[in-house]
């Protein structure tokens, strides 16, 4: 499985916060029915690693990654649980080196030229731009991309159905990360049909953007 290609094709990475283990598989299935065969489960909750393990074993058609990974130990634990890719809020060199050495796609958070240069030094060409809304949104991303022509970005934070196409219009954007199609509120309430519908709407928006509509 070429995970980078999968993410670039989908153009949308759902960022999922799971607070109860039993909600993991139904959430993954709702995203899949909506057209997204991938998801990023953040390591912000006690059950996150268990959720990754459940999804990996019971929904093998879903490519599950781990987000909010802040150190190498977390990356190792996530991969052991079945995570196929790693996303970090910032740039931790040890985490990046572990992932590169083990052929695991890793997307570290970079919001300054210095951080981007550090990522480039480790062989990374796709980085997370987070939190995008706080660090200047599309305008800031465009300015950062200008001196780094071989770097692509995954803006996350404040990206939603209202500005999705605006971000995708930027050539430097690899994909967008967002939780608007699978909010914690909907997950906790078991609103899986709504998650499916919002996911389908996001996928349709991407298709329209690709078609130039």
Image: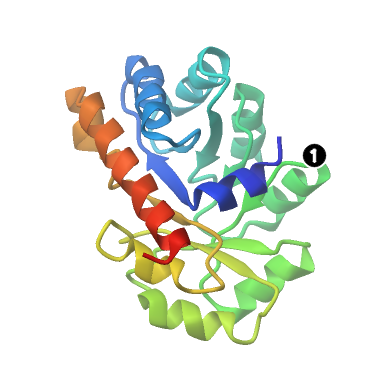
Q: Position of residue 129 (x, y in %)?
A: 49, 65
Q: Position of residue 67 (x, y in %)?
A: 50, 43
The quarter of the picture where residue 188 lies is top left
In the image, 138 versus 206, the foreground residue is 206
Crowd class of label 1 (few under 14; some 14 to 19; many from 20; radius 10 Å): few
In the image, 139 versus 46, the foreground residue is 139
Q: Is residue 70 visible?
A: no
The quarter of the picture where residue 157 lies is bottom left
Relative to 81, does residue 169 appear above or below in the rendering? Answer: below
Relative to 36, does residue 117 appear above or below in the rendering? Answer: below
The residue that appears at 34% across and 26% down in the rendered structure is 30
The residue that appears at 45% across and 50% down in the rendered structure is 12
The residue that appears at 35% across and 48% down in the rendered structure is 204
Q: Position of residue 113 (x, y in %)?
A: 60, 80
Q: Residue furthest right?
A: 101
Q: Residue tagged by mark 1? A: 102
Q: Is residue 36 visible?
A: yes
Please state, as top left, top right, bottom left or bottom right, where the C terminus lies in the image: bottom left
In screen coordinates, is 53 left or right of 32? right
Please state, as top left, top right, bottom left or bottom right, where the N terminus lies in the image: top right
Relative to 156, does residue 19 appear above or below in the rendering? Answer: above
């Amino acid at each position: 499985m070429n995970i980078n290609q999968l993410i670039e094709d989908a153009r949308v990475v759902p960022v999922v916060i799971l607070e109860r283990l039993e909600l993991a598989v139904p959430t993954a299935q709702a995203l899949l029915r909506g057209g997204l065969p991938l998801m990023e489960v953040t390591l912000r909750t006690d059950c996150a690693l268990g959720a990754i393990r459940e999804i990996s074993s019971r929904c093998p058609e879903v490519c599950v990654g781990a987000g909010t990974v802040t150190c190498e130990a977390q990356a190792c634990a996530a991969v052991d649980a079945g995570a196929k890719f790693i996303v970090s809020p910032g740039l931790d060199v040890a985490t990046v080196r572990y992932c590169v050495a083990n052929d695991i796609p890793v997307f570290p958070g970079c919001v300054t030229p210095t951080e981007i240069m550090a990522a480039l030094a480790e062989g990374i060409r796709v980085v997370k731009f987070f939190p995008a809304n706080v660090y200047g949104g599309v305008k800031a991303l465009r300015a950062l991309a200008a001196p780094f022509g071989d770097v692509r970005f995954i803006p996350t934070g404040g990206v939603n159905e209202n500005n999705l196409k605006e971000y995708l219009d930027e050539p430097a954007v690899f994909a967008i990360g967002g939780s608007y199609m699978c909010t914690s509120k909907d997950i906790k309430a078991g609103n899986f049909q709504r998650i499916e519908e919002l996911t389908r709407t996001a996928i349709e928006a991407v298709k329209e953007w690709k078609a130039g509509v």
